[in-house]
Structure formats: C-alpha cells, structure tokens
Amino acid sequence: MTTNHISLNPSGIARILGTVALFLVLASIGAQFSKFSFGHDHLKGLVPLFYIDAERNIPTYFSVLLMLFAALLLAVIAVLNGKQGAPHASKWAVLSFGFLFMAFDEAFQVHERLTVPVREFLGDGKLGIFYFAWIIPGIALVLILGLFFLRFLLHLSTTTRLRFLMAASLYIGGAIGVELIEGRYAELHGQQNWMYSMIAVAEESFEMAGLIVFIWALMKYCADNYKEVRFRFEA
C-alpha cells in the first residue's frame, strides 16, 4: 500500500498567514484613508469589503478561518491525547469547541448583541471605557476561563505554556484591551472618523496576530510531541 505524506512547516504556515493578515490590515487602512480623505465611502465596494471592523467581509472570514484552523488542530490534539490517556485531554476538546463557537461568533457578531441589554441594565448612561457594554460579561468570562484552564496550563511544558500565553495576551489585548480604548473614543467622538477606524484596525490586528501565534504554537506542540500524524481512510 502506497503511503502519502504531507509535511507541514509551522513557521512557514505562520508566515503565510501573517502575510495575508498584513495585506488585509494595509488594505483596510488604505480603504479608510480613501473614505475619510477623499470621500470615497464605497469605492466600488472595496471600502466595506476590506474594512477590518465591518461584518461579513474578507477580514471577517479570514478570522473565521483562523479560528476553524485552530479548532481543527485542537481536535486532533484532543484525540491523540485521549488515545494516550494523557491528563487534561478533555481540556483540549473543550478548547476546540470553544474555538468553534468563537468562529460562529465572529461570523455573526453574537457577542455584540449583549451591548444593548447590558447598557439598559446599567442605566444606559455614560459608560466611558465600557461604552461597548458586552465587554463587561466578556471580562468576567475571561477570568472564569483563566481559572478553569489554570491547571491545564501549568501541566504544559514551559515553552508551550509561554507560547499559549503570548497568543492569549495578543488576542485578549486586542479584543478587550484595545476595545476599552475604542469604546471610550466612540462615546466621545463617534465611530465615523479616521481615528476610530485606526483604533479598530489596531484591535483586529492584535486579534489576528494572537490567532496566528496560537496556530503556530499548536503546530509546534504537535511537532514536539507527535512528529507525524497519520490519517487512514477506509473504503
């Protein structure tokens, strides 16, 4: 029986993903520059198509693909750890389902629907950095998940743990850290201006960088622990 091999280079794949992300960031900046400097709000569809903070466009679906790629890698690791009877194998599966939900949320902006009810609960007054009020339950969820995965993180090798923490810091730094700044600016100056769009670009850039680093870290984990994974297809 012929054995076919497909070799994956974690650093090479990360570079390709990073190059695509950089192109999308630059395209978004160019589109917004055209909009606010020359008044080209649409530019034959290119402005909304590449604005990194808009819904259901090329940057959005690229982020969705990154999350699905991470979910697939996590699922493979969960199966391999489960077969080996490794501790915390279920945590890999939980992470995989978590990234599947993140992909769904990214595609349909589910978390943003929390903004209105949370604002109403808080009195709908001046919220400052919590202008995008979904971020309040978001912070609570991050803290809960941090405690839930603490033993899992400590069980990982130091190198893997640091890689995961670097990825999480980049992603959360964008999704929550920059979002706090973005919310304060939006409350004071609105969202239809050059500065807001650049803050939004920074937020999404951090998120994409965090996802790419995480994908790279997962592939490095596989390379360090499994070297080769074989799939067998039966007729």
Image (cartoon, rainbow, N blue to C red):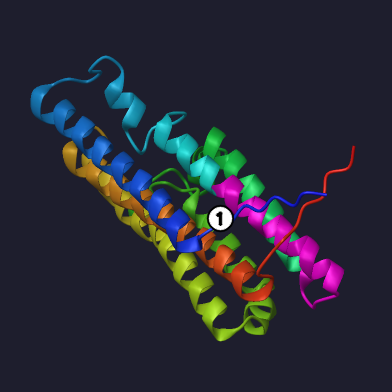
In the displayed image of the protein, which residue is found farthest to the front?
1
**Residue 3, how many percent across, how many down?**
75, 52
Magenta stretch contains residue 111: no
Q: How many marks?
A: 1
Q: Amino acid at mark 1?
A: Pro
Q: Between residues 194 and 28, which one lies in front from this camera angle?
A: 28
Q: Quadrant of residue 46?
A: top left
Magenta stretch contains residue 77: yes
Asked if 130 appears above or below 64 in the picture, the reply is below
Q: Between residues 38 and 183, which one lies in front from this camera angle?
A: 38
Report the side of 172 relative to 7 (left or right). left
Q: Secondary structure at mark 1?
A: helix
Asked if 22 appears above or below 73 in the picture, the reply is above
Bounds of the magenta segment: 67-90
Report the side of 210 relative to 218 (left or right). left
In the image, what residue occupies the spot 69% across and 70% down? 226
**Residue 145, how many percent across, how many down?**
63, 66
Residue topped by disc 1: 137
Is residue 118 visible to us here? Answer: yes
In the image, what residue occupies the spot 33% across and 25% down? 48
Q: Between residues 110 and 150, which one lies in front from this camera angle?
A: 150
**Residue 156, how many percent across, how many down?**
64, 80
Q: Between residues 148 and 210, which one lies in front from this camera angle?
A: 210
Asked if 199 appears above or below 112 in the picture, the reply is below
In the image, what residue occupies the spot 67% across and 59% down? 74
**Residue 138, how many percent across, how many down?**
54, 56
